[in-house]
Amino acid sequence: MSVTTDRPATAPDNPRNAGDGGRRDLRLFLVGQVASVFGTTLTSAAVSLIAVAWLGAGAREMSLIVVAGTLPALLFGPLCGVLLDRVRRPRRALITADLVAAAAVAACGLAAAVDALTVAWLAGLTVVLNSVGIVVESLYFSHLHALGVDDPRTARGKLQSSEMLSRSVANTVGAPIAAALGAALLFLADVFTYLISACCLMLLKAPDTRAPREDTGRTGVLREFRDGVGVIRRHPLLSAFTAYLFLSALATSGITTQRAVFLLDTVGLPVALYTLPAVVATAVGAAGALYAPRLLARGVPPRTVLLWGLPAAAVSTAVLPLAGGGTPLVLLAMVLSTALPLLFGAAVNIALVGVINDEIGDQYFARITTLLGSVSTLAATLGALLGGSVGTALGVRSGIWVCVGIDLFAAVVLVLVARRPAPEEVRP
């Protein structure tokens, strides 16, 4: 079976998808997605504050919420990938996801209003929002085909950069809004972000269709799951990237676990400055998401962006354990070690979508992305344990160097293994 290319699901000469109509749909889609991401991030940012400040949660209760957030990807991610690849009307599924999220947030808001909110409620909300996130992340990129956009790669860049800025703003204002409004009003106000997203999707004029499957028909869930795994295994770049992703997520989580202790205790960064570099980093990452499609439009292959971007991101993380010599130098190290990985990582994400669409095809998109998400989540869970162990045994600066070494090793192996050309046939 031949490799499919990145093409729209609807005919290019469809007047409802061309010109101003296509741009209008893309604008609506972007507004809706930004609103949905803002709502999810705002709620997630406020959950910890609500749990600790209003419900008196301790470390044990907070760990319950964190673990709850990992369950959808670990337990249901691969199965969801199979089912989402079967979806022929992605817009309907996205609208349903928004409405489910709105209902879950509204339920927590009502529970808070009648003083019935508990840590279990927050853990359940985290499960729902992360499950909805799997649906959205698997479908919203592929849904661009149905909008008939002229340049899907540039559209993806705009979506991703807008998402990153939306997350940054939501993370910044989440705690202040929660403190000002209280849990009940925060949740009830957040419901409107999901309703805005659902309304924007309902207003789209392009047909809610998806490219027809090119296989012989629907088979069992287990068979389709194995097909998805087989596609990754037979594709040299994706199989190498999966191994890289596991090691990199392991290392990144280990660094994150030790980061606060290193910056606040080891190098003495003032608490008031701790979150400052995140704002700069998000803006730089958004720039990377916008610039990557321009590289691809100039003829740079997606796999080239991938194989250059990942090592560059790994090298950038090595700046953090070099921090020292006064607050200005520590801040510089924080900005570089946070912003540059986001810059290269945003470009890599755009390129990865291009590789999947150009060399494999849209019909495997959800299976591949959910499998990669499950691998990343599992690795991050193990990485948190690794970071705590090596930081305790060696000291946090040495512990971070261990994790940086793992990340660099994974990047070098990826480049060496994945330099083979794209296969002509990778699907069953």
Image (cartoon, grey):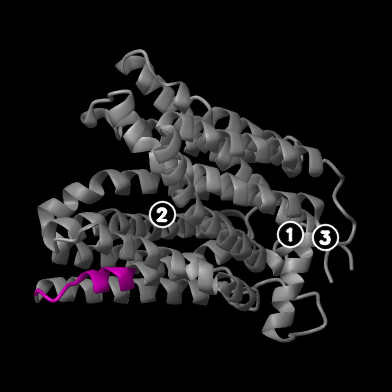
Per the image, label 1 sits on a secondary structure element best described as loop
- Marks 2 and 3 sit apart, C-alpha to C-alpha, by 35 Å
Left or right: 215 as drawn, with respect to 271: right
First in sequence: mark 1 or mark 2? 1
Q: Amino acid at mark 3?
A: Arg
Residue 117 is covered by the magenta coloring: yes
Residue that mark 1 sits on: 7
- Marks 1 and 2 sit apart, C-alpha to C-alpha, by 24 Å
Q: Is residue 180 above or below residue 404?
A: below
Q: Residue 5: horizontal and vertical position, in percent?
A: 79, 58
Q: Amino acid at mark 2?
A: Val
Which quadrant is the C terminus positioned in? bottom right
Bounds of the magenta segment = 115-125
Per the image, label 3 sits on a secondary structure element best described as helix
- Marks 3 and 1 sit apart, C-alpha to C-alpha, by 23 Å
Disc 2 residue crowd, few under 14, some 14–19, many 20+, Cα 10 Å: many
Q: Amino acid at mark 1?
A: Arg
Residue 297 visible (yes or no)? no
Main SS class of the magenta portion in the image: helix
- The image quadrant of residue 64 is bottom left
Residue 317 visible (yes or no)? yes
Q: Residue 365: horizontal and vertical position, in percent?
A: 66, 64
User: Which residue is drawn at the image coordinates 55% and 70% (left, top)?
Assistant: 77
User: Which residue is drawn at the image coordinates 17% and 72% (left, top)?
Assistant: 117
Residue that mark 2 sits on: 34
The label number, if any, that marks residue 234 in the structure image: 3
